[in-house]
Image (cartoon, rainbow, N blue to C red):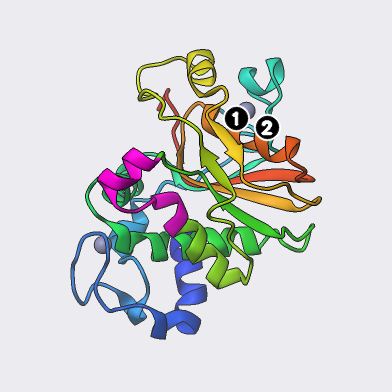
Amino acid sequence: MNPWLALKDEVSGLLDFLFPPVCPLCGVAGAVAGGDSFCRGCLAGFSPLASPCCPICALPFEGPAGSDHHCGGCLSEPPPFIRVTALGIYQGTLAEAVRDLKYREGFHLGRPLGRLLAALLAGRRGERPFGLLVPVPLHGERLKERTYNQAQLLAEAIGRHLAVPVASELLRRTRSTPPQQGLSASERLRNLKGAFALRKGLDGERVVLVDDVLTTGATARECSRVLLKGGAAEVEVAVVARAARHL
Ligand SMILES: [Zn+2]
Ligand SMILES: [Zn+2]
């Protein structure tokens, strides 16, 4: 069984009252059993990140389950973040949800996607609780065009569900960067060098950096580096979708 369907069954009773009976992604009314967030059809189209994948950046591999190993990128240059949590692979209905959230004024998707991410993160909180959610910021010009920051919507939804504070203004873009599409991982990192700064220092907090999608991880690396330099004890990353280029 698709684990998202299992999770849906598990939490739907508890969270019924929070969600309207229309699927926020496909808009089909009545398809949302128990007033849950996404309908079964859309949830079934989310491809969860399954083993084998990289234990740090969550890059999925082809091969038998259980053969997790570090990817080439994490081996040659270990990232500053400890791991990546993602709802699934950037494909199917999950990719559609990310594109809607980002480009098609789908700000109403921030809440249900954030709730699913919160459930994943909550399962791990027993290990060592994190104390702060930090969304990846948009540059002022892009924020003006788009009117909202999708990463902030996700962080706020996670924060509400887990009662963890969101530091929306902590990380800021110091300059607008050219689009990352079509650039290699190292070009992306160069493109982002010095593009982020902290408004104030941190005091040993465990931070969850929140974004919509992780592709090469260049943005997550640069933001994590800045957060650690500014006093964070540890940074992990939570995204809606993990892009896997070979799939
Ligand atoms: Zn749907
Ligand atoms: Zn990796």
- Report the magenta residues as a range: 140-153
Of residue 73 and residue 230, the one placed in the foreground of this image is 230
Determine which residue is flagged by label 1: 222
Relative placement, left or right, of 208 versus 30 is right
Residue 117, position as x, y percentages in the image? 52, 58
- Residue at left offset 33%, top offset 65%: 38
Which is nearer the eye, 116 or 69? 116
At horizontal 68% and vertical 26% (from top left) the residue drawn is 70
* Residue assigned mark 2: 225
Residue 61 in sight: no
Q: Is residue 146 magenta?
A: yes
Whether residue 107 is in magenta: the answer is no
Q: Are marks 2 and 1 in contact (CB under 8 Å)?
A: yes
Q: Is residue 53 above or below residue 50?
A: above
The amino acid on which the numbered mark 1 sits, given as a three-letter code, is Glu
Residue 30 sits in which quadrant?
A: bottom left
Horizontal and vertical percent position of residue 55:
67, 36
Q: Is residue 229 visible?
A: yes
Gap in Å between the C-alphas at discs 2 and 1? 5 Å
